[in-house]
Image (spheres, grey):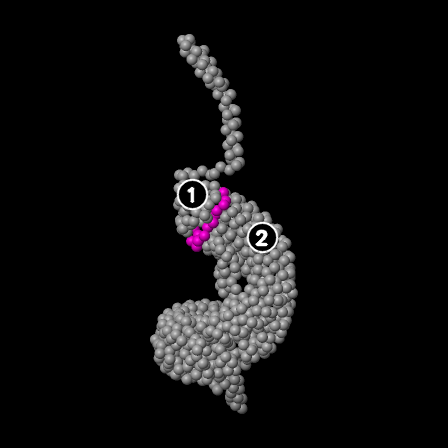
Amino acid sequence: MAKLSLLANLLTIFFIHSLCCPDEQKQALLQFKSNFYSVFISNSSFDSSTFGLESWNSSLDCCAWERVVCNPRSLLKPVTALNLDSIVPMQSFEPILVTSSVLTPLFRVKSLMLLDISSNYIQDEIPGKGFANLTKLVYLDLRQNSFNGSIPLQLFHLSFLQYLDLGSNSLEGVLSPEVGYLQNLRTLRLDENFLGGDIPREIENLTKLQNLSLRHNEFSGGFPSSVLQLKELEELDLRENLFSMQIPGEIWKLSNISTLALSKNKLSGAIPASVQNLSKLETLELENNMLSGEIPSWLFHKKALKNLFLGGNNLTWNNNLKIVPECTLSKLSLKSCGLAGKIPEWISTQKSLDFLDLSNNKLEGFFPPWLAEMEVGSIILSDNKLTGTIPPRLFRSLSLSVLALSRNTFSGELPANIGDANEIMILMLAENNFTGPIPTSIADIYRLLLLDLSGNRFSGNTFPAFDPEALLAYVDFSSNELSGEVPVTFSRETKILALGKNNFSGSLPKNLTTMSQLEHLDLHDNHITGEFPEFLSEIPTLQVLNLRNNSLNGFIPDTISNLSNLQILDVSSNSLVGSIPEVLGNLIGMTKTPNTLSSVSDMFTFSIEFNDLLVNWKNSIQGLSSHNLLIYSLLDLSKNQLSGKIPASLGHLKDLKVLNISYNRFSGSIPESFGNMDSLESLDLSHNKLSGSIPQSLSKLLQLGTLDVSNNKLWGQIPVGGQMNTMNDPNFFANNSGLCGMQIRVPCPEEPSPPKTQDSERKETWFLWEGAWIGFPLGFFLSVLIIFLTGYLVPAPPPNRRRLRRTSISNFY
C-alpha cells in the first residue's frame, strides 16, 4: 500500500507540474517584470496597473498570465508567445525611455515562437547576441521603439523567421547581404529608420516574401532589380527614399503585386507600359518624383485599380482625352498634372471616391454641384482658379473630413450651415476673396483640428465660441479685416493661434492662458495696446511669440524667462522702454536645439501647407516654413525705446540664429560674450549709441553672414578672421566714430586712439586754458629770476648789450 501511495503522489506531482509552464521560464518572466518596474518605480506618477502585467505573479501558472501563450500540446507547456506591445506607459505624452538591457531575461525563454515588444520606446542597440538564443522565432515585432545602431546580423540567422518588423526606430547603416538567409520570410518591414545604401542583391533569395516595406529611409541607387525576382511579392513600399533612374520595364515580373508605392523618390522617365500587365494592381503611388510624359489613359482601364497617386511630377494630362473609367477608384491624386478647364466630369462616375486631390492645376469655373453631392471624404482643390461661392449642399455631407480650397478666387460669404458638416477635421480656405463675418456655426464642428481662413476679407468682431474641450489645434485668421478685442474662445488644446494683420485692439486678454497647450501665438500688425503682459509667462509651452508692430509699452518683464521653450520672440516696432532683462539670456529654447521637431502637420497622413511665419530675417521680411520652424531661433527687439547696456547674458543663447536690437537707445560696449553664440547668422546692432570697439570674439562666429553696426559711436579696427573677412559692405559700418579695417578700405593707424567725446574735449579745453593761466605768471617769475641772477652774478655787459636785453624783455611783455 505504501508503494502504491508513493506512486500516486509522484503521478500527482508530475501531473500538476505538467500543467504549469517551466519554472525557469516563469522566473525569467518575473525578472523581466521586475526590470521594467524598476525603471518606473522612482517616478511619482508610477502606477503598476498601466503596464498590463498585473496578473504576472508567482502564485499563478505563467500560462494563465495575460500576454503569455503556452503550447497546450506539450507536457512541459513551454511559453511560445509573448505579446508585450505598448506596456510602457505614456507620461503626459512624453515616453520614459527604457534601455534594451530589460530584455535580457526574455532570452532565456528559448521556446519562444512569437515575440512582440513594439511601441515601448526601448533605446540602445538591438541585443543581437540575446536574440541569437531564440532560434525558434517565427514572428518578431520590434516596431516603434528607439533602437539605434545597425541591424544585428544575428537576426538574419533566425532561419524560421516569417515576420520581421523593425520599423519606426533609429536604425542606421546598410542592409546586410546576410538578409538573404531569411528564406522563410513572408514580411519584412524596415520603414521609418535611417538605413541607406543600395538594396543588396541577396534579397532575391527571399523567394517567399509577400510584403516588403522600406519606406522613409535613405536607400539609394536605381530601382533594385533584385526585387523583381520576388515572384510572390504582393506589397512593395519604397516611398520616401533616394531611389533614382527609371522604373524598369521588367516591373511586369511582379505578377502578384497589389500595392506598388514608389512616391517621394527621384525616379524619372515615363510610367512604363508594362504596368498594364499587373492585373492585380490595386494601389499605384508614384507621387513626388521626377516622372515625365503624358499620363496614360490605360491606367483608368485597369479594373482592379482602387488608389492612384500621380501628382507632384512632370507628368501632363491630355485635356482633350475623353476618359471612361473601368476602375472604381477610392483615392485619386492628380495634383500639379496640368489639368485645365473645368473639374473633369468623369470623376462623377466614381461613386466610391473617398479622397480627391486636384490641387496646383489650372482648373477654372465653379465648384461643381455633383461633387458637393458625392460624399467624398477629402476634397483638395487648392492652388487653382476656381470661382464663385461654395454650395451649401457640401456641408450636409456625412463623410467630408478634409476640405482644402486655399489660393483660388472663391468669393461671397461662407454658408451659414457650415457647422452641419460635423465630420470635418481640416478646413483650409486661405487666400480667397471670402467676405462677411466668420460663421459662428463653425464652432459646432467638434472634430475640427485645423482651421485656416487667412488671407481673405472676413470682417466683424464676433467669433465662433468653441467648446474648451474641443479638439481644435490650429487656428489661422491672419490677414483679414477682423476687429474688436483679441478673441480667446478657442479650445484648451489649441497649439497654434495666428491672428496677425487684422484690426484687433485693446490689451491682450488674460484668458489666453486658458490655452494651456499653446505653442505658437502670432498677433503681429494689429493695434494692441497696454503693457507687455506678465501673464504670458503662465503659458510655458510657448515656442513662438510674435507681437511685432503693435503699440505695446512698458518694460519687458523678468518673468519672460519662465518661457523655457521659447525659440522665436519678436516684439519689434512697439514702444517698449527700459533695459533688456538679464534673465533673457536664460531662455533654454534659444540655448540648445530641440531633440525632436513636432508639428501639427504630423497628425495627418498627407502633406498640409501651412502659412509661413513672417519675420525680419537678415534685414528683410522673410517667411519661415512652418514645417521646420523649430530649427530656427530668433530674438527681435528692434524699433522700440529700449536703453541701457546690452546684457552680456545674451551670449548664452548659443542656438540663436538672428539677433536684432537695432533702432533703440542702447549704450556701452558690445559684449565680448557675443562671440559665444555659435549658431548666429545675423546680428543687427545698428542705430543705437554703442561705443568702444567691435569685439574680436565675433570672428569665432562661423555661421555669421550679416553684421550691421552702423549709426553708433564705435571706433577702432574691425575684427578680422573667419566670417568677419567677408563683411565688406561699408553701409553696415557707416556713421560711427572712427572704424577702420580692410572691410571698409580704411587703413588703421598703428595705435589707434579712442575718439574724443564731448566730456573729454571739455576737460581738454579746460586743461589748456588752465595751463595758460598758470604758465603765464610762472613764466614771468622765472624770467625775472633769470634776469636777476644774470645781472648780479655775472660781470656787467657793455651798455649796448644791456640795452638789447632790456629790449628783449620789453618785447616779451
- The amino acid type, in three-letter code, at marker 2 is Asn
Question: Where 793 sits versus 740, above or below?
Answer: above
Q: Secondary structure at mark 1?
A: strand
Task: Identify the residue position indicated by label 2 in the image.
Answer: 574
Q: Is residue 178 above or below residue 556?
A: below
Q: Nearer the viewer, residue 433 or 790?
A: 433
In the image, is residue 710 part of the stretch drawn in magenta? yes
Q: Position of residue 488 (x, y in %)?
A: 63, 63
Can residue 795 be seen at all in this image of the molecule?
Answer: no
- The answer to whether 792 appears left or right of 560 in the picture is left
Residue drawn at the location 45% of the way across and 49% of the way down? 698
- Image position of 673 (left or right of 390): left
Residue at which label 1 appears? 740
Residue 730 spot, x, y in % from top left: 43, 47
- Residue sitting nearer the eye, 712 or 43: 712
Q: Quadrant of residue 224?
A: bottom left
- Residue appearing at x 46%, y 54% in the figure: 681
Instruction: Left or right? Give the position of 8 relative to 209.
Output: right
Of 650 and 357, the residue lying toward us: 357
Which stretch appears magenta? 700-714
